[in-house]
Image (cartoon, helix red, strand yellow):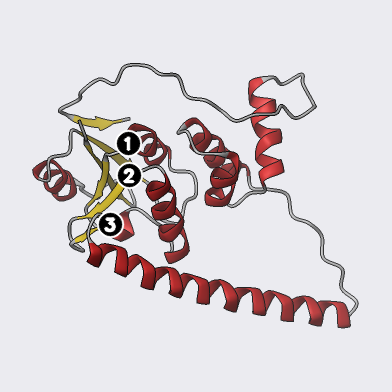
Amino acid sequence: MSWKIGYARVSREGQTNDQQIAALKAEGCREVFVETASGARADRPELAKALAAVREGDSLVIWKLDRLARSTKHLIELSDTLKARGIQLISITDRLDTATASGQLLFTVLGAIAQFERDVIIERVNAGLVRAKAEGKVGGRPKADAAKIEHGLALLKAGLSYGKAAKLAGVGTATLHRASDRSENPSKTNRNSGRFRNGNGMRKQMNGVAQH
């Protein structure tokens, strides 16, 4: 039996999410995960829980696309991840359902836009490197943001592969492997092989709103 899992988000304390929750419950969501966080944040624990709750054949339902993703690129990546897992994405306000032809067409267009944005960014970065080299500046390799690593670990726990989790969190795959090894065995320095596997626990039906 397929389920609809809802995700609602407001940016800061004091804002109400009642409208989102009411719309998600009216859409038939069995469970709704509610988050108070800026859309620009990479580490959103309630989103990670929502992604962990949906299974193959289910639908992730949101009130509006900007409640889910922090950028077009992030939206496409999340959509691709859900599609690979056999999960549909529904946006109530945008009247978007990836199970329909029109929904798939929209994401194809968004994907082309996201690729264009990536190409522009790469071009600018390369131009900056050329200028820096010409000026004798040497760039260092920045350390991975701790919040991004935590987000990546949460996505691993949601069942995503290391590659997908690292890409969505914005960290390197090797960095995520090392962080996962440290969290599982702080005394171990060598990277373990294999992927994180979820347990096969029974799924409980929840008719309320999950606020954590």
Residue 10, given in percent of the width and then of the height, sits at: 29, 50
Residue 190, given in percent of the width and then of the height, sits at: 79, 27
Q: Which mark is residue 95?
A: none
Q: Is residue 83 above or below residue 186?
A: below
- Specify the quadrant that holds the C terminus: top left
Residue 95, given in percent of the width and then of the height, sits at: 18, 62
Q: Which mark is residue 87?
A: 2
Q: Which mark is residue 98?
A: 3
Residue at coordinates 59% horizontally, 40% vertically from top-left? 162
**Amino acid beneath label 3:** Thr
**Amino acid beneath label 1:** Val
Which residue is disc 1 drawn over? 54
- Specify the quadrant that holds the N terminus: top left
Disc 3 element: loop
Residue at coordinates 45% horizontally, 73% vertically from top-left? 112
Mark nearer the viewer, 1 or 3: 3
- Between the residue at mark 3 and the residue at mark 2, the CA separation in whole angstroms equals 9 Å
**Amino acid beneath label 2:** Ile
Residue 206, given in percent of the width and then of the height, sits at: 20, 25
Q: Is residue 70 visible?
A: no
Marks 2 & 1, CB-CB < 8 Å contact: yes
Q: Is residue 133 above or below residue 181?
A: below
N-term mark: 2 or 1: 1
Q: In terms of depth relative to the viewer, which is nearer, 51 or 12? A: 51
N-term mark: 3 or 2: 2
